[in-house]
Image (tube, rainbow, N blue to C red):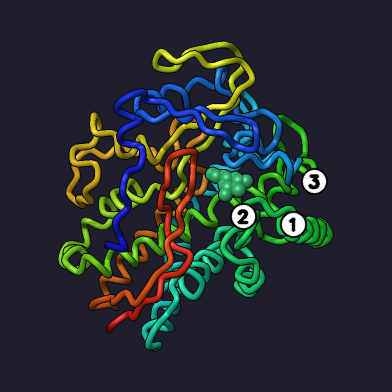
Amino acid sequence: MKSEFSDPFEEARQKTGLEHIDDQNDPVAMILRHKDVRKTAHNWKTYQSGATPGRIVVPSEVNIRDIRQIPFEVDPPLHKDFRELLDGWFKRPNGKEYQEVLKDQISTLLDEVLSKDTIEVVHDFSLKLQSRALTILLNTSLSESETFISWGTHVFRSEDDSLDASKANVLYDYLDEKINAARNNLGEDLYSVLLQSEVNGKKLTHDEIKGIMILTFAGGRDTVINAVTNTVAYFAEHPESLLEVKNSPDKINKAVEELIRYFSPLTHMGRVVTEDTQICEHAIKNDTRVSLCWASANRDETVFKNPNEVNFDRKINPHVAFGFSHHNCLGATHARQIMRTLLALLADKVTSIDIINSKENIEKWGEFNRKVGFHELNVTFNK
Ligand code: EMZ
């Protein structure tokens, strides 16, 4: 089944709980069990986020950027100050007006694709959806989304290059221009809000604002695109689940959490170790990297019953798809609202979806092959 996402980590998680992989000659020990992932995420003193910019990301981005992304590459106590500044803005998706605009956007897009015979979901649906919704999060004009769409599905990756510096520069130049324009003419957008904000009694620097904006653009890009595309594939192959949502709209929030657990759009996030230590009896050396493998933790059979099944009635669902502890995803409110709106509108407007063909997007981590989504998914949406 195209919408099946198997769990490549099962055996290693059960046997050793840890797997060593190479990443550009800066190896990573992947932490695979739910309990260890949560424990490590919590312990910011031994497992640091504030290392050289780009080093906690896997694959490492140290060679393509030197700007620190904020707040996710900052450790406590400063991390908390940045979160306090940003949390309010990033919780705006809980507001009614925000939700109305988002619903309008997705509804228009769905009408567009329903009027066509076939549609390529990744580029003609998910990328557009994510790019347009981002303008609400930034509180900028909808027309900006045309630029975001022209960049393709990832801001640092292109078709044949998983770390594309020239592509990253397009985003950096764009952000420089936007921050400078806002400085000369303050408005109501996120750039302007940040330009007027203080952290610890000090105005943010240009690079701090840029670091926050890079994360806003990069963090929710391929992750949201994959979540949306995978959801379409899932409902195409599970019409009974679409019917379930149609008949019981009160299940939508749980359904969204379960789909996000199952897809785990971000496979893992790294930390840099600050002292010789141990994780489930394996020695871990100072100044090496570990990764918190959300995707594996979300299939941990000691926590989730029948972890490889999608069950909208799952009672407890402590998934870590949005991370865990103080670094939990800043964009999660926005992402959840996108997914909830999408499910409600699919249930409302679509009777069935037919998959015509697809090209899967498989990540390779050492011996593991993990499907995260699709490079291409051609479907017909039926009214
Ligand atoms: C970083 C990361 C954040 C990274 C929550 O994830 O997302 C990746 O897609 C980017 O490449 O720079 O923003």
For the C terminus, the image quarter is bottom left
Callout 2: CB less than 8 Å from ligand 1: no
- Residue in the foreground of this view, choosing between 88 and 4: 4
Q: Quadrant of residue 141?
A: bottom right
Disc sitting over residue 97 in the figure:
none
- Is there CB contact under 8 Å for labels 2 and 1? yes
**Can residue 211 be seen from the camera position used here?**
yes
Q: Position of residue 381 (x, y in %)?
A: 32, 79
Q: Earlier in the sequence, mark 2 or mark 3?
A: 3
- Residue in the foreground of this view, choosing between 314 and 58: 58
- SS label for mark 1: helix
Q: Quadrant of residue 279?
A: top left
- SS label for mark 2: helix
Report the amino acid beneath label 1: Leu
- Is there CB contact under 8 Å for labels 2 and 3? no
**Can residue 186 be seen from the camera position used here?**
no
What residue does disc 2 label? 217
Q: Position of residue 222 (x, y in %)?
A: 52, 56
Q: Residues within 10 Å of mark 2 (few under 14, many from 20)?
A: some
Q: Earlier in the sequence, mark 2 or mark 1?
A: 1
Residue reaching furthest to the front: 367
Q: Is residue 301 above or below residue 149?
A: above
Q: Is residue 251 above or below residue 132?
A: above
- Residue in the foreground of this view, choosing between 361 and 218: 361
- The Cα atoms of the two marked residues, 2 and 1, are separated by 10 Å
Disc sitting over residue 206 in the figure:
3
Q: Earlier in the sequence, mark 3 or mark 1?
A: 1
Q: Quadrant of residue 57?
A: top right
For the N terminus, the image quarter is bottom left
- Identify the residue at image location x=60%, y=34%: 56
What residue does disc 1 label? 175
